[in-house]
Image (spheres, helix red, strand yellow):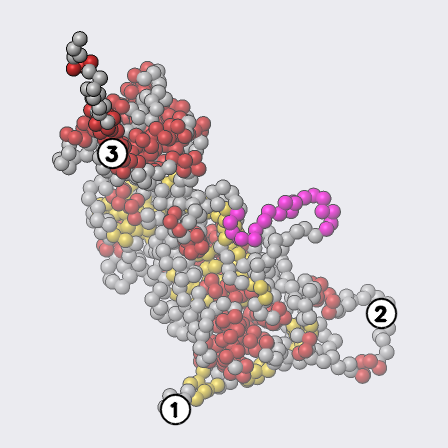
Amino acid sequence: MALTPSTSPDTPETPRRPLWRRWWVRLFAALALLVAIAAGVFWLVFMRDLPSVDALKAYEPPLPTHVRGNDGTPIQSYARERRVELSFNEYPPLLVRAFLAAEDKSFFEHGGVDYPGLAGAVLDYAKKWGTGRRARGGSTITQQVAKNLLIGDAYSPTRKVKEAILAYKIEDTLTKQQILELYLNQIALGRNAFGVEAAAHAYFDKELNELTLGQMAYLALLPKGPANYDPIRHPDRALERRAYVLREMLANNFITRAQYDAAMAEPLGTVLRRTPKYAQVGGYFVEELRRQLIKRYGEKAESGPNSVYDGGLWVRSSLDTRLQDLAAEALRDGLVRFEGGRGWSGPIRHEDIDGDNWQQALLNTNIGLDYRDWRAGIVTAKDAGEATIGFANGRTGTLPRGLAQMPRRGTAATAFSALKVGDIIAVSPEGSQFALRSVPRISGGFVVEEPATGRVLAMQGGFDARLQAFNRATQAERQPGSTIKPIVYSAALDHGMTPASIIVDGPFCIDQGAGLGTKCFRNFGNSAGAGPHTMRWGIEQSRNLMTVRTASTVGMKNVVAMIKQMGIGDFPPYLAYALGAGETTVSQMVNAYAILANNGRGGDPTLIDFVQDRHGKVIWPENWHACDRCNAADYDGKPMPRPISRQRQVMDAMTAYQMVHITEGVIQRGTATGLRDLNRPMFGKTGTNNGPTDVWFVGGTPQFVGGLYIGYDTPRSLGGYAQGGTIAVPIFHQFAQKAYEGLDKLPFRAAPGIRMVRIDRASGRPVYGTFPTGDDPKPAVIWEAFKPESEPRRRARRAEAASPAPATPAGPTKPAPPRDSDFLQREGGIY
């Protein structure tokens, strides 16, 4: 039987095709490659550089720095974004529902993305591509959190996808309540308010829990564009959008019909743009504090976690609000008093106004006055008989011609005729009308410091910080005049002279070198020299000739070294600097006198007691630690713990006390007798420089030392009658009269080693058998402070030693004369 080909054993088998050549394998590989490429592209476009959502768990928003006075009174905050951070359970439920109705009704149902809304946003974007118009949003609240906190607001086709990816991750990481908390704390709502609590203050001047339903609905519409629904510029648009939010709340059963009807009937109820409420005190102080904080911690978040404008610091300052008010009032009263009768100084500023925009124009200037009953107002209209004045609160008043009749300074015209619409002026109530006031052109600075700690308790750098930002207490370098003399004589005391040293008050000339002639010094008022007198007399009477003679004897190198050591300035060794020719600030002079009052101990003055970060940890001073039992009742007579002093010994303690003891005589019988009626231990020195262009006083008590100057910013003569004793001393007297109310009359404590010796005040020689009298300001015999090595020797008089003791009288005896130990006990003892 023949075999067929198919069954022939010799026919070879057909080979099988390789797997990679099979069509379905190739298709699968191509699809896999496409998926990988798509995934790679997706990763490159959307996932690469995508931030981690884990940062939101520990997210710290930018927070303002808050400043308090030394008694805890809030006095200022520093912020570019006004924000108050709250937890979710602090938000009123109706407020949360208002934002859900306006922004994301299905927030508690979706997983981070609202797909219908997202699709609509993409289609709208496609329609508006290239038109320049912005497409509508479709973001959920979670996506807005991703945008605001993670990827920013840069507009791009990919941002929505990135938002969606991050929204899913956020929903996996945080609870719904945590997401809402982040959103409500961070959302920008206009008027520099971030978060709903800050917005409640910015728009309604209320706490969040005080808002009505209508006001909550208004806040809920603001994320769509605060400028679009501004209550001043677009009130109708704002009401229309608020009605939409309320309708959505009703439709979603968030509120009842009764609540809806009541809210719809409400007016917007917003207030004008305003700054946060703080005590109107210490404007110059808080600005100087801000500069110091920025120098230490930086200004913005890029500078570190504790930056001034973002770090949320809590600062306890050294400001004593009572003393600050007294210092500000005394200085400003003195400035107004000095310029009284000199005519109207002119408007504070001029603003171009058109129609009804005067109120916002005035608010935008941030000009205000808190001096007595003065107010800043803007002239909104004027005719022949009166002017209409508008104020920041929206009210208006009348300024009649008769209450603005003072002459316009430098012209023959009256102030009323010089007024123009748009002028911002100072006025005060006069019955039902207002009277024009003149803001002084002269200015000055006043600083109060606590000697024991170096803490600045008060600082006034001009008439009003909102009118004149330049701080004359710390930034104005002026010639201090004779207030430098105690520092000059301190150098002399360090180099062997005593308060009883005799110095000639007579002509003193120096050869200035080849071709420069001779320089002759003179006393104030060109008075002739009075001959030989004690150092004490020369300081009390502020004799220039005695000062330069002393400086020449001691050596100007030693004098300027002492001036530099006291932190006043670094001056060349010329005799004119012994009379106050070198420029310095009020703050530096007050600090130098505080060192004197503290037995030579001191350092740089400080405005800050301590600084806490946003979590409450004290970050300055660096070695600060809590005093756990400082107020414990079980000390049982043992010494209380005291904070570690950061002060150092700047000058010899005995020299410092000697100078304080000498300058107490300036108050009793010298150039500052206007302070004698305060009737307490006080030291100080007046100053009047050439011109005179500035007048000074610096001095005080163991509790606090103060100092001030007044003068024009561009120096010019104050008039021949102007002296520190006639202008500066009355200002300090006004301050001190109230500042020391209720305070003990503490004596200055003598430094260890000081010897108190009775001397003749005129000659400086020791006196025996006679004691100073306590009531006479110009006694013949006084107690004088000497160092042990310079104390006059006590010579026993043989006649007194040999004479018998007097018989005891039978009748009433006179009080025994005071002993040295009595003086030491009365003056605080030798420590």
Badge 1 is on which residue? 514
Q: Which residues are magenta?
A: 618-638
Badge 2 is on which residue? 809
Asked whether the viewer can see residue 271, the reply is: no
Looking at the image, residue 403 lies above or below residue 731: above
Q: Position of residue 764 (x, y in %)?
A: 64, 79
Q: Residue furthest front?
A: 1
Q: Do the CB atoms of the residues marked 3 and 2 lie less than 8 Å apart?
A: no
In the picture, residue 666 is in which quadrant? bottom right
Residue at image position (24%, 38%) is 155
Asked whether the viewer can see residue 586, the reply is: yes
Residue flagged by tag 2: what amino acid is it? Answer: Pro
The 10 Å Cα crowd at callout 2, few under 14, some 14 to 19, many 20 or more, is few
Looking at the image, residue 193 lies above or below residue 330: above
**Of callouts 3 and 2, the N-terminal one:** 3
Q: Position of residue 430 (x, y in %)?
A: 35, 46
Badge 3 is on which residue? 37
Residue at image position (48%, 68%) is 568
Residue at image position (56%, 74%) is 490
Judging depth in this view, the residue of 266 and 628 nearest the camera is 628
Residue flagged by tag 1: what amino acid is it? Answer: Ala
Q: Quadrant of the N terminus?
A: top left
Mark 3 or 2, which is nearer the eye?
3
* In magenta segment, residue 625: yes
